[in-house]
Amino acid sequence: MQKKLKHLNVHAFLLSFPQILWVLILPSQIVSAQKNTTIPVNVGVVLDMDTWIGKMGLSCISMALSDFYSSHSDYKTRIVLNNRDSKKDVVGAAAAALDLLKNTEVQAIMGPVSSIQAEFINDLGDKAHVPIISFSATSTFLSPLSSPYFIRATQNDSSQVKAISSIVKAFGWREVVPIYVDNQLGEGILPFLTDAFDEINARIPYCSAIPSLATDEQIVAELHKLMTIQTRVFIVHLLPSLGSRLFAKAKQLGMMGAGYAWICTDAITDELHSIDPSIIDTMQGVLGVRPHVPNTAELQSFIKRWKLKFQQSNSDIVNPQLNVFGLWAYDSMTALAMAIEEAGVSNIGFDQLSDISGNSTDLESFGVSRNGPKLLQAMLGTAFQGLSGDFIIVDGQLESPVYDIVNVIGNGVKEIGFWTADKGIVRQINPITIKKLGTILWPGDTATPPKGWANPKNGKKLRVGVPVNSRFSQFVKVTRNSQTNTTMVKGYCIDIFDAVMALVPYAVPYEYVPFATSDGMSAGSYDGLVYQVYLGNFDAVAGDIAITANRSLYVDFSLAYTESGIAMIVPTDNQSRNTWIFLKPLTWDLWLTSFLAFITIGLLIWVLEHRINDEFRGPPLHQIGTILCFSFSTMVFAHQEKIVSNLARFVLVIWFLVVFILTQSYTASLTTRLTVQQLQPTITSVDELIKTRAYVGYQNASFLSKILLQMGFDESRLVAFNSSEELNDLSTKGSGNGGIAAVFDEIPYMKLILGTYCKTDGFGFAFPIGSPLAPEVSRAILNVTQGFQILEIEKKWHLETSRCQDYSASSTPGSLDVGSFRGLFLIMGITAISAFIIHWTMFLYEH
């Protein structure tokens, strides 16, 4: 019985063993199956598959997915690529994107290649809430702010303009000419270039637009235009194919020689390694900027793997070269894979729009992605260290990096420095030590930096208007030769203008054009001459042009190159002819104090001497005469009376010291007045002229007549003169004899008058409002007027006034007053009082 039961148990165990084994194995299989379950996520790729950037981008995208998921095998999501060829066409790109959104319902789209294609696809992405991620659309017209589902995983073209302007500033170039492709790619960067150059006071005199499909003849014609302007610094923003042809033609025309400076944007600089060596040979000395890519071991390893894989599928391409767009394609796909995993995206369907009508087009018939908002936020928050460097999305686009500054030398490029947003130009990034570029080989195989300008061939000259009827020929003199029909312009103002223009940091060809009628007479007033600049008939005005508030309403003036303001000249009289000049050295209070001091000392000596000295005795009138004679004879130390008293002798010693100092001071002051010519103005104030209704002079056709009327002068008392000779004649006659009592004029004219006849708002150059030449001329004026050159020019035209005395502050010595001798009189007073008290004390003691 027991054996039977045992047999049954064994049999039952054998029957149930498979079930037990299945129970034990099933959970592990379930767990393994769960681990191997992944969520596929459809992602579209829209590229120009027949182009270099399309082939390179697609291979980098594929390698990014392979590398990412091999190192993140635990991720639940897996991107499934759906590739579409946009066929280098805007419509083709839009059709490919529409197919992906409507039929495949992709969760994101990588691409397209061009900025124009991206502009169309962005609208589809915004409507479908599907992120559009482009690693090569650099146009500034594309903005993540206006297209929220557009993510630019590349650099905006405008991010490099600061680096370019820093190069221009480093070499002191004041003018640059951009050469750009005449489409959205080229036009987008121009406003940013203009703003960047404005910040460093550089101007753009001309913009050279080259059609994207330009022929060689069109390129040559545009280069000929550039040769006719003075600027020799060019910023090239073209696609590599068009840029290569440009440099080849520039080489043929001699524009790649010494004196020229060429700077390429990253559109060309990023592709230099793939440009034909024969074209590189034409670009010797060219500078370029490109985004900086850290040279890491990971990058070098990837480049080797990429070349092997790329050539396996593209055996017809020899020695392929990876550029930064391929790295951005790799990093942007890596970022998208991370964002999809973080957002938990799955291939759930689109929400169809309920308001779509039956006759709607394909552009309206697709739905809205449910995962779009989550995926967009995850993508914008993704940051990591990629192959291209720090991958950080800021405001919908890749954060601006450091820029390399390179120099085309030999068969390749040489890094000569870097540009960073916070430090500017530096020689090295880590550590930052020298804030300058390395050695540069410029076009023409020279190490000397180009000055940035040259005298243009057949260039337009600046038309500089000059007055014909300058009131003083020393300032501007226009001489016309009727036989040769030529005009010569010379004068102080012309020499100043020539000296200033020679210091402007670029060539400015100009010619003087007299403001005259056909018969050589003046065509109008000075106000009319300045107004011609506003009308565009003149590019500038040089001459004795006063800077006034009214004129500055329609022109920009340079800094004044003469003293500013208005002065008054009046006749003078010779003070040395004054009958009573011998009284001038002392003030009346000092004369009176001295007289009283003499009388007091005489009385004191009489008091001290008359009791013991017979010479101070006698009748009252005799004693009064003795006192007066003794007092004043001490002035010349000629007293005859013998002094007996010791107190009197002591008083006289102190008194003689006082008299000696007084007489010497008087003699010195009188000598100065008699030996130095002293001229005093006959009129000391404008109010005196107005009250006496004196005649005053002013230059004919001058703005001063209005100012004099505003000051209160009677119009009938204003006399206009036309020349310095006429002014001298009027001043000599005087106001009562048909002349004038004073003359009002601008200080520069006064200096000329004083330099010629010894009678004692500045001038500026006018330019159109907003002219960039005005600040350049102002800076040059400072260099001229603060050096010796201005003195030489003034001497040449007799504008120096060194031989005439300046009577604006009188050189007449002041009269001596009591305050000048207060100490002496104090000592004398104490001595006299002390002697008097001692004398009477002794007298009372004796009697």
Image (cartoon, rainbow, N blue to C red):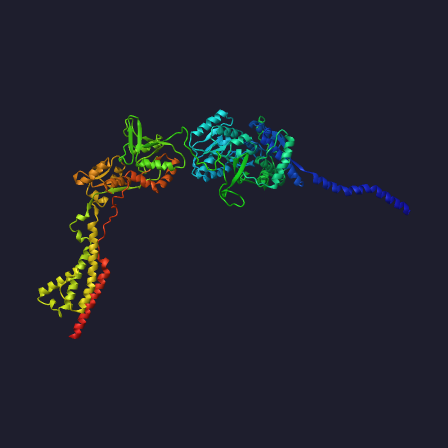
Q: Is residue 277 left or right of residue 751?
A: right
Residue 691 image point, x, y percent? 20, 43
Q: In which image quadrant can residue 694 be found?
A: top left
Q: Is residue 591 left or right of residue 131?
A: left
Q: Is residue 77 left or right of residue 277?
A: right
Compared to residue 21, the image places residue 827 above or below, namely: below
Visible residue check, residue 719: no
Q: Nearer the viewer, residue 246 or 559?
A: 246
Q: In which image quadrant can residue 606 be found?
A: bottom left
Residue 820 image point, x, y percent? 23, 57
Compared to residue 343, the image places residue 459 above or below, namely: above
Q: In which image quadrant can residue 115 be found?
A: top right
Q: Nearer the viewer, residue 654 or 243?
A: 654
The quarter of the rendered structure image containing the C terminus is: bottom left
Q: Is residue 710 left or right of residue 391?
A: left
Q: Nearer the viewer, residue 329 or 100?
A: 329
Visible residue check, residue 330: yes
Question: Looking at the image, which residue sits at the far right?
Answer: 1
Residue 559 image point, x, y percent? 35, 39
Residue 414 image point, x, y percent? 53, 38
Counting the numbered discs, the total is: 0
